[in-house]
Amino acid sequence: MYNKIILAGNLTRDIEVRYTQSGAAIGNTAIATSRKFKSQSGEQKEETLFVDITFFGRTAEIANQYLRKGSKVLVDGRLKLDQWTAQDGSKRSKHSVTVESLQMLGSKDEAAPMGGNGYSQQGGSSYDAPAQNNYSQPAPSAPAAAPQQPASNLPEIDINEDEIPF
């Protein structure tokens, strides 16, 4: 069986971190996601979904350090069904997500020390490696007049900076 969920949205509250007796961090918050669609009558509508999410270990500590209410994130993890009995005796349940990987989507100003780098619980205690520079360094014996060429033949993209969403 396969249980994987990916959500992108904004945190609805600051992360609440607590520690187990063994010292492991557990962070709880929620994420709000939305979608826009047209109803059968042609009316433009927006639907918002709120999902509780839980971070564990170093991911919880990183999230607590760099994220706040309103922060844009992309998380992937496992969907979980929580069940309990309320004080009035009624049975309750809700779905939540146990986060396995976190990607911070906000601008550099919103998460200053980390920028947009991601953090994955599966990857141990290190951040995802930043993108490598695609330009090769000239060899010491290369003539000084030779222009530097990109290592790959990627086409240049003509795009207006106002069209970039971040």
Image: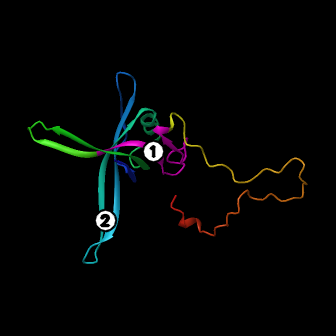
Q: Which residues are magenta?
A: 96-122
Determine the residue located farthest toward the front in the rendered image: 1
Q: Label 2 crowding class (10 Å Cα cut-off): few <14, some 14-19, many 20+? A: few
Is residue 16 covered in magenta? no
Could one spot residue 72 in this view of the protein?
no
* Callout 2 amino acid: Glu
Give the image location of residue 53, x and y in percent: 34, 43
Q: Earlier in the sequence, mark 2 or mark 1?
A: 2
* Callout 1 amino acid: Leu
Picture residue at 41% right of the left edge, 43% below the top: 68
Distance (Cα) linking label 2 and label 1:
25 Å
Could one spot residue 98 in this view of the protein?
yes
User: What secondary structure is marked by label 1?
Assistant: strand
Is residue 97 covered in magenta? yes
Task: Give the residue at mark 2.
Answer: 46
Task: Give the residue at mark 1.
Answer: 102
Picture residue at 23% right of the left edge, 46% below the top: 94
